[in-house]
Image (cartoon, rainbow, N blue to C red):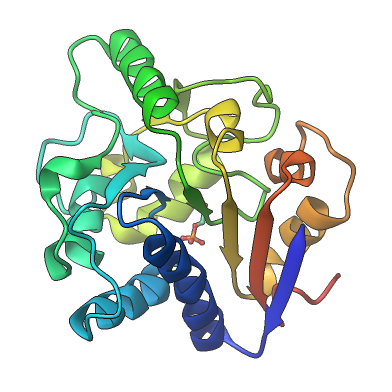
Amino acid sequence: MKVIVTENYDEMSKKAAEVIAEVIKADENAVLGLATGTTPIGLYKELIDKCAKKEISFKNIKTVNLDEYVGLPKGHVQSYDYFMKDNLFNHVDIDLANTNLPNGIAADLDAECARYTALLNKMRQSIQLLGIGSNGHIGFNEPKTPFDSTTHIVNLTESTIKDNSRLFDDISEVPTKAITMGIANIMNAKKILVVANGENKAKAVYNMVKGPVTEDCPASVLQKHEDVIVIVDKKAAALL
Ligand code: PGA
C-alpha cells in the first residue's frame, strides 16, 4: 500500500486526478471504477479540467460505479446516476452508453446483482476509486460484510441513513436499501485508489492502513491487494 499525505483537500484532489489521468493515458479503453460522495468531487473537477485542456479523453473510456440507492426514481437528484452525470459525465467527452451503475429500480433485484457481477467480471476495472466511510466502509459494504461478497443488496445502517440525510429534504426520504459492488468485486480491480480527507476519517484511515485485516473494518482488506494508492490530506492521516 502506497500512502501519500497531502497538505489539504485540493492537493489530494489534484494528485488523485493525476493517478486516474495516467491510467487513461496508458490505455484509452481503460475501465474506470468510480465512486460517489463528497470526497471525489474535487478530483472529478480536475479530470473535467484535464479533458477540457485535451490532456485526456474519455471517448473510449468505460465506467462502472460502486453503488446506487434502491427505489429512487430515474433522474432523482439524489440518485448516484444523477450525481455522476452532474459531477463528471455531462462535462467530459464520454459516451453515456459506456457508463454503468447498478440499477436500483430493477424489478428483480437479485437478478440485477448477478447481472452487475457478471458485467464486472467481464470488464474488470483498470482502476477502482474508493472513498472510505468513517466506520471503514467501502462502497456500501458496512462492517462485517464478508470479504468474498459480490454485488448485493444492503439495508443501510441507521448511522449511514443519518449521514446521508443531509442531502435530502427530510430523513424519511432517504432510501433504506442500496445495491453495491461486493468486496470481492472491488478487490478484483487491477489497481485501487483511495481518497479521504478530514479528521473524521482519521480513525478509519488508520484502521485501513495499519489495523488488523478484519471484516470489522472493510477497508482493511485492501492491505491484501498488490496495487493500492491511498491519497489523504494531513487531517485524515493524523493517526498514521
Ligand atoms: P464521503 O463518503 O466521500 O461523502 O465522505 C465516503 C464514503 O462513505 O464512502
- Whole-percent x and y of residue 35? 41, 52
- Whole-percent x and y of residue 26? 43, 61
Residue at the bottom extreme of this rendering: 7
Is 130 positioned to the left or the right of 174 in the image? right
Tell me which residue sits at (88%, 55%) in the image. Answer: 210
- Whole-percent x and y of residue 97? 12, 41
Q: How many marks?
A: 0
Where on the picture, by quarter, is residue 199?
A: bottom right
Tell me which residue sits at (31%, 77%) in the image. Answer: 45
Is 218 positioned to the left or the right of 191 in the image? right
- Whole-percent x and y of residue 98? 19, 43
Q: Nearer the viewer, residue 223 or 57?
A: 57
Tell me which residue sits at (59%, 51%) in the image. Answer: 192
Is 107 positioned to the left or the right of 139 in the image? left
Q: Is residue 132 visible?
A: no
Q: Nearer the viewer, residue 62 or 155?
A: 62
Question: As displayed, is residue 218 above or below residue 49?
Answer: above
User: In which quadrant will I find the C terminus?
Assistant: bottom right
Q: Is residue 15 visible?
A: yes
User: In which quadrant will I find the N terminus?
Assistant: bottom right
Q: Nearer the viewer, residue 2 or 41?
A: 2
Where on the picture, by quarter, is residue 67?
A: top left
Is 232 positioned to the left or the right of 188 in the image? right
